[in-house]
Amino acid sequence: MHSYKVHFNNAEQVFDFVTKIRKFDFDMDLKAGCRIVDAKSIVSAAAISDASELTLQIHADDCSEVLDCISPYLAA
């Protein structure tokens, strides 16, 4: 599993993010504090998208293609 900080400025970005990651076959979660939700669910992602610290957990060995797709949303 790999973890990366992500950030969204608005609901449109959440929708775009979820649309991009849905094409991958492996599981991904968004974590905010003790809450963990399915990152591929628009409703779940939107529900925690305003958290100050949001972590994407990718359950795969090689996630380089995912990182290329979601690079605009990776936190510095």
Image: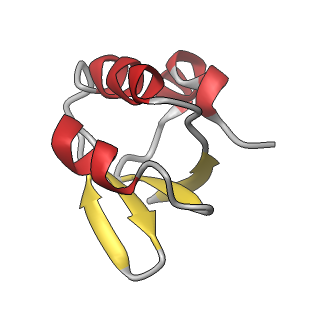
Q: How many marks?
A: 0
- State left or right for residue 22 relative to residue 29: left
Quarter the N terminus occupies = bottom left
**Residue placed at 19% from the left, 31% from the top?**
25
In front of the other: 70 or 61: 70
**Residue placed at 51% from the left, 17% from the top?**
69
Residue 12 vertical position relative to residue 14 in the rendered view, above or below: above
- State left or right for residue 48 relative to residue 53: left
Judge whether residue 41 can be spotted in this image.
Answer: no
Judge whether residue 4 can be spotted in this image.
Answer: yes
Residue 33 vertical position relative to residue 25 in the rendered view, above or below: below
**Picture quarter containing residue 12?**
top left
**Picture quarter containing residue 53?**
bottom right
Residue 63 image offset from top left, x and y in percent: 48, 35
**Residue placed at 29% from the left, 53% from the top?**
47
Residue 34 image offset from top left, x and y in percent: 39, 82
Residue 8 vertical position relative to residue 39 in the rendered view, above or below: above
Residue 14 image offset from top left, x and y in percent: 40, 30
In front of the other: 12 or 3: 12
